[in-house]
Image (cartoon, rainbow, N blue to C red):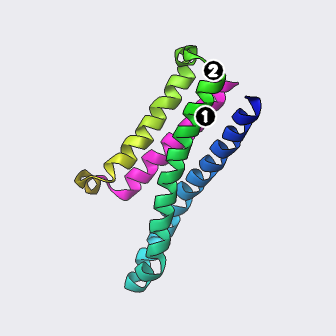
Amino acid sequence: MDDIFRLLLFIHFGALLFAATTNLIMPALMPRMMALGAEGRTILGPLTRQLSINARLSLLVLVLTGVLMVAIRYDTGLWANPWFAAKMAFIAVITLGIGLSFTPWSRAIPPKVFGSITRIALVGTIFCAVMAFN
């Protein structure tokens, strides 16, 4: 069971790195794409769409591997840990934000605000995970 846990942890960290990298690169990529006009959207548009899809998939992998790791190694008492509860609240913020991006209300949140909220929630998730599991 320890080997399965380690494999899940490796996959979990890989998905976390991909999601974090995408979250950091998109705010730098989008203004450059817009500055290039129609040509920039033609060239960089498919790349940004693929990065967005991959980031959403990495969130799904993070949630699935996280649930499996908690089921393998920990019991329900983990929820009593305030750091773990805070980590899950940050994950809920990220998931809610991505869920909102599929609705008409997504236009109500400016991209810079959405990116900032997601980055803060990502950093909060990582911080709380370190505090909860150490």
Answer whether labels 2 and 1 touch (C-beta < 8 Å): no
Residue at 61% of width from left, 34% of height from top?
Answer: 127
Residue 37 at what x, y percent from top left?
39, 82
Of callouts 2 and 1, the N-terminal one: 2
- Under mark 2, the amino acid is Tyr
In the current view of this chain or complex, which residue is farthest to the bottom?
Answer: 39
Residue 127's disc is: 1
> Range of the magenta residues?
109-134
In the current view of this chain or complex, which residue is farthest to the left?
Answer: 104
- Decide whether residue 48 is among the magenta residues: no
Is 16 left, or right, of 57 in this rendering?
right
Is 2 left, or right, of 8 in this rendering?
right
- Decide whether residue 130 is among the magenta residues: yes
Q: Looking at the figure, which quarter contains the C terminus?
A: top right
Determine which residue is flagged by label 2: 74
Residue 31 at what x, y percent from top left?
45, 70
Chief SS of the magenta region: helix
**Number of numbered markers:** 2
Residue 92 at what x, y percent from top left?
42, 35
Which quadrant would residue 12 be assigned to in this image?
top right
Is 77 left, or right, of 117 in this rendering?
right
Distance from Cα at disc 2 to Cα at disc 1: 19 Å
Q: In the rendered image of this protein, does residue 122 appear above or below residue 129?
A: below
Crowding at dot 1, Cα within 10 Å, few <14 / some 14-19 / many 20+, comes out as some
Residue at 55% of width from left, 32% of height from top?
Answer: 67
- Under mark 1, the amino acid is Phe
Name the front one of labels 2 and 1.
Answer: 2
Q: Secondary structure at mark 1?
A: helix
Residue 125 at what x, y percent from top left?
55, 36
Which quadrant would residue 107 be assigned to in this image?
bottom left
